[in-house]
Image: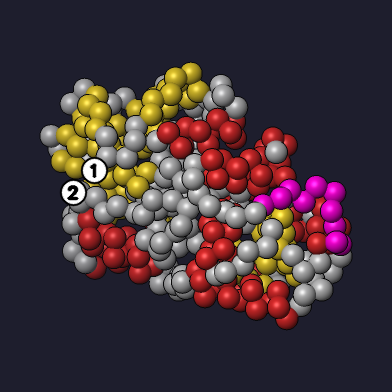
Amino acid sequence: MSETLILTPEGLYCPDVRAHIDPVRPVERAIITHGHADHARAGHGSVLATPQTLDIMAIRYGQGFCEQRQELVYGEVVKVAETKISLHPAGHVLGSAQVRLADKAGRTVISGDYKRQSDPTCADFELVPCDTFVTEATFGLPVFRHPPAQEEMQKLLASLQLLPEKTHLLGAYSLGKAQRVIAEIRAAGYERTIYLHGALVNLCTYYQDQGVDLGSLEPVGTRGRELAGEIVMCPPGQLADRWARRFGDAMTSVASGWMRVRARARQRGVELPLVISDHSDWNDLCRTIRETGAQTIWVTHGAEDALVHWCENQGLVARPLNMIGYDDGEEAAEATVSQIDAVAG
Ligand SMILES: [Zn+2]
Ligand SMILES: [Zn+2]
């Protein structure tokens, strides 16, 4: 391992700072990259994160989600013991950050989840040169290529025109994906009101409060068949739920990088799969690793082995982290929190 970070059962740990990064269990001090449920958990002593990530954790878990909050805006440097800590945009969801740790051993960057595609709802990914790069690998197989989001939006708008009698039920996770999809729908020129399942309302409102333009939004409330021809958004889990039946014979759609796997879309009964991901695809993972200039790569969170193999072929030192607690990944963790959001919203 490097001298800066070690692996513990709770996750990555920086001994000098005495803090875990995105720990999977409650710890004394945590640094949190972003608000998704597999990274941000309630019950830590102190949490250092961007102001938006702290806000999002409070929205999801309540104001008492930790004992003490420490805000760090992008680019600001705080020194703890012998280590300089800073956070840099990861381009993943609002407030998402890469964590940079600089000490005598060198510069380490923990990416958290990240993407290079542009996203109108959050700051663009910042390339942070480093010696050791800890990268996610959710879509770490060459088969994963994410098309431009606008291409996928055209499919949705074409279907609305072709089938104006059907409600278009669009499944998207409540943090990040829902807001990005709405912003992309707006960018494609669609100005009508978009209707929201209760689980999406709070975070959409938060994004709007943060200055992200999402256009006209309304909760679905008790409406059903009268929303024929409209776009209704909900967490993906709701598509197969009794809740969805109120819209009659709706067109079901899901926005996810996993929709690239047709069998997965079919198995979930998704008629209109939209390949929109908030993670890097294979090309962008490889490109980013190269561009950081790091000689040591740690791979976590997804298809680790393929990316480790690629790194080794490039002459880099690479290792899979095989951390427990992230195995199910964002989809499963976010599905659980969507239920919390639904209760809260
Ligand atoms: Zn995430
Ligand atoms: Zn994740």
Residue 161 visible in the shown view: yes
Q: Is residue 206 above or below residue 243?
A: above
Residue 317 visible in the shown view: no
Residue at the far left in the pictured view: 104
How far separated are the C-alphas under marks 1 and 2?
A: 6 Å
Q: Are marks 1 and 2 in contact (CB under 8 Å)?
A: yes
First to last magenta residue range: 217-226
Disc 1 crowd, CA 10 A, few/some/many (<14, 14-19, 20+): many
Disc tally is 2
The N terminus sits in image quarter: top left
> Could you say which is closer to the camera, residue 43 or residue 208?
208
Residue at the far bottom in the pictured view: 162
> Could you say which is closer to the camera, residue 328 or residue 90?
90
**Is 199 on the left-hand or right-hand side of 35?**
right
Q: Residue at x 59, y 31 (%)?
A: 61
Residue at the far top in the pictured view: 67
Residue 131 circle label:
2
Which amino acid type is marked by label 2?
Answer: Asp
Disc 2 crowd, CA 10 A, few/some/many (<14, 14-19, 20+): some
Q: Residue at x 52, y 75 (%)?
A: 151
Q: Is residue 102 above or below residue 66?
A: below
**Is 339 on the left-hand or right-hand side of 184?**
right
Q: Position of residue 260 (x, y in %)?
A: 54, 71
Q: Residue at x 77, y 51 (%)?
A: 220
The question of residue 92 being in magenta is answered with no
Q: Residue at x 43, y 24 (%)?
A: 69
Which amino acid type is marked by label 1?
Answer: Thr
The C terminus sits in image quarter: top right
Q: Which residue is mark 1?
A: 108
**Is 176 on the left-hand or right-hand side of 271?**
left
